[in-house]
Image (tube, rainbow, N blue to C red):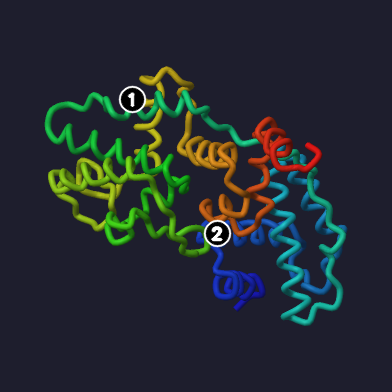
Amino acid sequence: MSVIDQFIDSRQLDRGSADKTIEAYKRDLIQFSQSLKNETRLEDIDLNDLNAFISRLYGQKQKASSIARKVSTLRQFFKFCCLEKGLKKNPAEKLQGPHQTKRLPKFLDHKAVTELLKASDIGWPYEKGNREALQARDRAMVYLLYATGIRVSELVGLSTHNLDLQLEYIRVKGKGDKERIVPYASVAGDKLRAYLELRMQLNPATDHLFVNRNGLAITRQGFWKILKVLAERAGIPSNVSPHFLRHSFATHLLQSGMNLRSVQMLLGHSDLSTTQIYAHVTPEHLKIAHRKFHPRG
């Protein structure tokens, strides 16, 4: 087994990294190994080899985010080699990545969300034949996405067993197969019940909660297409993505006074710093909270 394969195994077994992350690790490391001279030994790799690789990426006009990911992969790989494979010197210790400006998340204001929910209540103009069931499904998906802030991959990955209609929560499997419990509002529960009453009309061939007209699990792309049409009908930007609703969920909770730690748990962020970016999109509400609670505000 190669050192790269051993590293990949360690990420899967020890860290529980998601499949897409594992694929990216492997792709990045293979690309780097192909940039080296034949028969280059691990212990012969130095900072110059790494910088030459990164320079080629810049020359190929790759995105800063992609380069930053590759730098992170190399740092993790060589740290693993030092800890587990006896490599005496870490060549990636001083490897510099591109400076990235954190982009503020795009979200919908309360009025836009209300219009989107209204559009889902009216529904996509499906042709006759299971129209009611498909519209009920779309309605339940939009309401549940905004009510929980889950990722679209988590939404389409839900099974009927992940749903507790009585206690009104869903069990979500997020990144790295980490599970969390996310509650939802009663209005979303009503939409889910209405959909479940009609779900069998779609002849589901899977236990996925949301299925398409063929009875198979609806895809992320399929839901994105639905959301785009509903957004257009609501009179809001048609570039709305499912992630807009996740960002809207988090932003609106912070605006309402929920603390960052609680929002972090609901979103399934492993690091609070990931959640903190939402604080930057609600400065006025932070000012109001400061004036309200600070003794000399």
Question: CA–CA distance between discs 2 and 1?
Answer: 38 Å
Residue drawn at x 56%, y 62% as measured from the top left: 22
Depth check, mark 2 against mark 1: the one in front is: 1
Q: Position of residue 290 (x, y in %)?
A: 73, 39
Q: Position of residue 51 (x, y in %)?
A: 83, 53
Mark 1 — residue? 119
Classify mark 1: helix, strand or loop. Answer: helix
Mark 2 — residue? 23
Near mark 1 (Cα within 10 A), the count class, few <14, some 14-19 or many ≥20, is many
Q: Is residue 137 left or right of residue 13?
A: left
Q: Position of residue 2 (x, y in %)?
A: 63, 75
Chain-order first, disc 2 or disc 1: 2
The quadrant holding residue 234 is: top left
Q: Residue furthest top?
A: 235
Q: Is residue 85 left or right of residue 224?
A: right
- Indicate the quadrant containing the C terminus: top left, top right, bottom left or bottom right: top right
